[in-house]
Image (cartoon, rainbow, N blue to C red):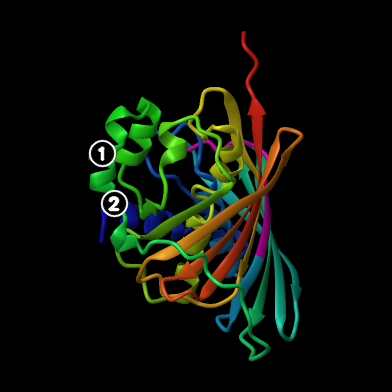
Amino acid sequence: MSRAMENLLSILDLERLELDLFRGTSPDNGWQRVFGGQVIAQALVSAQRTIADDRHVHSLHSYFMRPGDPSVPIIYEVDRIRDGASFNTRRVVAIQHGKAIFSLSASFQRDEPGLDHQVDMPDVPMPEDLLGEGDLKEKYLKNAPENVRRYWERERPIEMRPVSLTHYISQEKLAPVQNVWVRANGGVPNDRRTQEAVLAYLSDMTLLDTSLFAHGLSVFSNKIQAASLDHSMWFHRPYAMDDWMLYAQNSPNASGARGLNNGGLYTRDGVLIASVAQEGLIRQRTKA
């Protein structure tokens, strides 16, 4: 297991302070603010710990209110909204410096049989047919901006293989569609709740970028201010996260300094694991 995955699993093991009160920490990776996927995953873990073992998350909806400070712990306060015969509802507020920085509502369900269908996975090259991260660094990143190189050279708990890197290395205006193969950088425990939390963590990766494709920009551009505003996720089918997954993304709209992005996470065999929707701030910076 990579050190990065060990660190991720460590920060997902929240400290219980009281019955419905938990404390989480952030890794020391030099970032100026807490990664949004981390807060989503930690909030989900805090809600999971108030739910019976036979219930699993089927949807979550969240809002980012303030940037997270990685130098201090995050307190997660869980509100037990409802416990029903089949469904449970929880609300979680993340607090730092006495203020709410994030809120999450999640619904949990006992597994049930039912009707089953899904949309097909996009037809894209398999991950083995794409350049690995080492090859990407050597072939493309040596000419990329410094902040792009720093991002890709840092060890992460999630390995990524984008089908295309054009938006990182050019200002070409592209269709607002992105496909990225992702997988855990090391084993994920054989525990469905941990797998759900890691899936929630990675769901915030690369998604906001898609709304910038049509404008010849990336989240690393100094021409824009970019940040996640809200994030929703639906968990369709359990997955052990022991192989590559395709994160198929598209952006149907950008307006009002916001970009809307949709995503679907598929197994290699084309099974839809989860769906994601996120709106992000993509504000153009004005010259001083």
- Please tell me which of labels 2 and 1 falls first in the chain: 2
Relative to 268, residue 206 above or below = above
**Callouts 2 and 1 close, C-beta under 8 Å:** yes
Which residue is painted at 34% across and 53% down in the image? 7
Q: How many marks?
A: 2
Q: Which residue is mark 2?
A: 131
Quadrant occupied by the C terminus: top right
Mark 1 secondary-structure assignment:
helix
Residue 258 falls in image quadrant: top right
Identity, as a three-letter code, of the amino acid under mark 1: Lys
Relative to 19, residue 134 above or below = above
**Which residues are the magenta region?**
60-70
Which residue is painted at 44% across and 62% down in the image? 124
User: Residue 139, labelled with which disc?
Assistant: 1
**Residue situated in front as seen by the camera: 122 or 43:** 122
Relative to 4, residue 186 above or below = below
Identity, as a three-letter code, of the amino acid under mark 2: Leu
Q: Position of residue 22 (x, y in %)?
A: 55, 56
Quadrant occupied by the N terminus: bottom left
Which residue is painted at 68% across and 88% down in the image? 115
Q: Position of residue 187 (x, y in %)?
A: 31, 67
